[in-house]
Amino acid sequence: MKISFTINGQDQTVEVADPYTPLLWVVRDILDLKGTKFGCGKAACGACTLHVNGEAVRSCSYAVKFAEGAQVTTIEGLGTKENPHPVQQAWKDQVVPQCGYCQPGFMMATAALLEKIPNPTDEDIDQNIINVCRCGTYYRMRKAIHQAAELANNSTKE
């Protein structure tokens, strides 16, 4: 079955045997975008978070057939080295990652949150960023989320 969608601004058509193949495996194994990580396979940890039509989704349990015609964004499409997304810049400034494995999912969840709630409170963060980090870098992430909101808000004023 052929599935067509746009990923990181590029039109793609992929051939899959099973339309219920998780989008994660299409992104990683067919499109060779390795930034999105496999964590639990049950949509619980959030390591596989990416955006579909601007919404954060857990790609390990999101059937590729639902991506037909959609706009998909992975961590590779969030920003660039020369022009990082405010979330990426804040993550770097706050030295958030310890091992770093789960961080792409956290950054994608945060970018989606900031689109909905440009100035999140700690409570907003607690209710919306429910990914899991085995290294426990939550304190640094919270600081980075607040900084990313500030950076994003400042960039829209310019």
Image: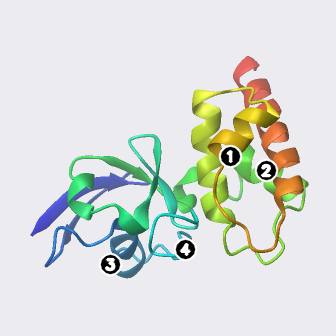
For disc 2, the marked residue is: 89
Give the crowd class for mark 3: few <14, some 14-19, many >=20 residues within 10 Å: few
Task: Tell me the CA gap for discs 3 and 1.
Answer: 25 Å
- What residue type is disc 3 on? Ile
Give the crowd class for mark 1: few <14, some 14-19, many >=20 residues within 10 Å: many
The answer to whether one can see residue 80 in this image is no
Tag shown at residue 58? none
Residue lying at 64% horizontally and 58% vertically, measured from the top left: 131
Q: Could you tell me which quadrant the C terminus lies in? A: top right
SS under mark 4: loop
For disc 1, the marked residue is: 85
For disc 3, the marked residue is: 30
**What is the image's colouring?**
rainbow
Residue lying at 53% horizontally and 69% vertically, measured from the top left: 36
Q: Could you tell me which quadrant the N terminus lies in? A: bottom left
Of the image marks 4 and 3, the number of the one nearer the N terminus: 3
Task: Tell me the CA gap for discs 2 and 1.
Answer: 6 Å
Q: Is the C-beta separation of discs 1 and 4 under 8 Å?
A: no
- What residue type is disc 4 on? Lys
Task: Tell me the CA gap for discs 4 and 3.
Answer: 14 Å
Q: Is the C-beta separation of discs 2 and 1 under 8 Å?
A: yes
Task: Tell me the CA gap for discs 1 and 4.
Answer: 19 Å
